[in-house]
Image: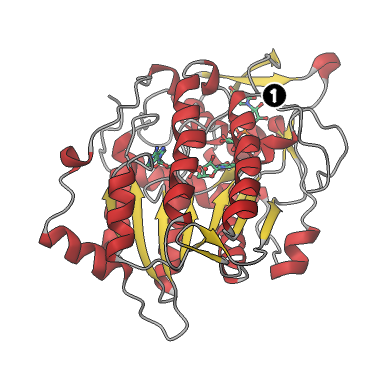
Amino acid sequence: MFIFFFRTPSIPSPSSLPTDHSRRSLRTYNNFGAAWEKRVRSSARIRSPNGVSVLVTGAAGFVGTHVSAALKRRGDGVLGLDNFNDYYDPSLKRARQALLERTGVFIVEGDINDVDLLKKLFEIVAFTHVMHLAAQAGVRYAMENPGSYVHSNIAGFVNLLEVCKSMNPQPAIVWASSSSVYGLNTKVPFSERDRTDQPASLYAATKKAGEEIAHTYNHIYGLSLTGLRFFTVYGPWGRPDMAYFFFTRDILKGKSIPIFEAANHGTVARDFTYIDDIVRGCLGALDTAEKSTGSGGKKTGPAQLRVFNLGNTSPVPVSELVSILERLLKVKAERNIMKLPRNGDVQFTHANISYAQSEFGYKPKTDLQNGLKKFVQWYINYYSDGKKADQ
Ligand SMILES: NC(=O)c1ccc[n+]([C@@H]2O[C@H](COP(=O)([O-])OP(=O)(O)OC[C@H]3O[C@@H](n4cnc5c(N)ncnc54)[C@H](O)[C@@H]3O)[C@@H](O)[C@H]2O)c1
Ligand SMILES: O=C(O)[C@H]1O[C@H](OP(=O)(O)OP(=O)(O)OC[C@H]2O[C@@H](n3ccc(=O)[nH]c3=O)[C@H](O)[C@@H]2O)[C@H](O)[C@@H](O)[C@H]1O
């Protein structure tokens, strides 16, 4: 028996989303021109004495929006870049953009593969840092659209690094890797020293490739590079393709939800990490990032190269996530227990965070119960004002 206590929100299901991530040329984005340059400059203006200027790629994304807002709040100059692709409902990205614009952050519409655009941005602003969060995310979608992962996570990353290495001065780069690089590793909790050579998805393989690519650009060009392995991030303004988000939608709709179970009723669990904790980790990594040591493509000395886990350190079974949602939503879920398909998912994740703790005091503060409470409040508020999210 299902109890509905408010209007059922509707958002598109990830499986119905288009698979073509168009590559629009620079001109179609309406970039360049005096008014556009003024907005870029104003957004990137540093407003506090110790501030830095940060180019945030993927700024209209879930993590990018929260990180951009936090940087802006403390007085840093922040410019966003995002291609607003339709992997999930672009209207949610537009709503995040509107939120950021109210805080003074401008998001340039463009692709990280667009060299001319990137060079133009660096010509206008001498960014001290790049917070690189643009990527094709999601482990399961890689079986549907592998090309989008190569386009954004490999080609796009190399392109960005090519532009950064030729700058004078070069920016320091903090970028999003993923807990998925641990793949089929069975040693827990996952430490940065553990093996990462058994990816279970193409997504994971592209993030692992990113870590190797980072090594190369650090070694040859002296770029300062910090990779962050985020562990299943959740919270307000989250991603509709992630389980906690579409479980919420489907529980409210009275639709059955597929809950994966490993062989012999083995538990599938995640080290779910609340967005505010991830944001603190991103800022900590940025604040401890040393300067790059090259300029104009020439290295002048050794540069910093780091990789950190940013997790919560307490894995929770997916079935428990569903129980928490049931309590918060006051609706019983229709559970469809399924064998964990070979679709890119791993059985469990669990972060050892001692390295991030020692380097910049990273300490997650929010447990799943409290974090989901904040997510559900946001979700109900966001989708209850007649917003038409279904396309
Ligand atoms: N959310 C998580 O649980 C999680 C976990 C591990 C790692 N990550 C990584 O963290 C980063 C941020 O993830 P998120 O959850 O905010 O995802 P997201 O999809 O919400 O954000 C990524 C943003 O990048 C943009 N983008 C994608 N390709 C682009 C391109 N080629 N050029 C310009 N913009 C592009 C998208 O439009 C999107 O707005 C990603 O690199 C992701 O792989 C996320
Ligand atoms: O930390 C990461 O590196 C990754 O985090 C996230 O991946 P995941 O941890 O797989 O999150 P998510 O899809 O929400 O599935 C959560 C749980 O629900 C289970 N799950 C999922 C779908 C389903 O239908 N049923 C189910 O039981 C599923 O088996 C899993 O146990 C990011 O999406 C990804 O971009 C990547 O960066």
Relative placement, left or right, of 158 versus 230 is left
What residue do we see at 20% from left, 63% from top?
39
| Position of 260 relative to 328 (above/below) | above
The quarter of the displayed image where residue 106 is located: bottom left
Name the image quarter holding the C terminus: top left
Q: Is residue 227 visible?
A: no
The quarter of the displayed image where residue 316 is located: top right
Relative placement, left or right, of 39 versus 337 is left
Instruction: Determine crowd level at label 1: few under 14, some 14-19, many 20+ residues with C-alpha closer than 10 A.
Output: many
Kindly tell me whether mark 1's CB lies below 8 Å from ligand 2. Answer: no
**Label total for image:** 1
Residue 209, x across and y down, in percent:
62, 35
Relative placement, left or right, of 40 versus 253 is left
| Residue indicated by mark 1 | 200
| Position of 289 relative to 332 (above/below) | below
Name the image quarter holding the N terminus: top right
| Position of 166 relative to 146 (above/below) | below
Residue 70, x across and y down, in percent:
46, 66
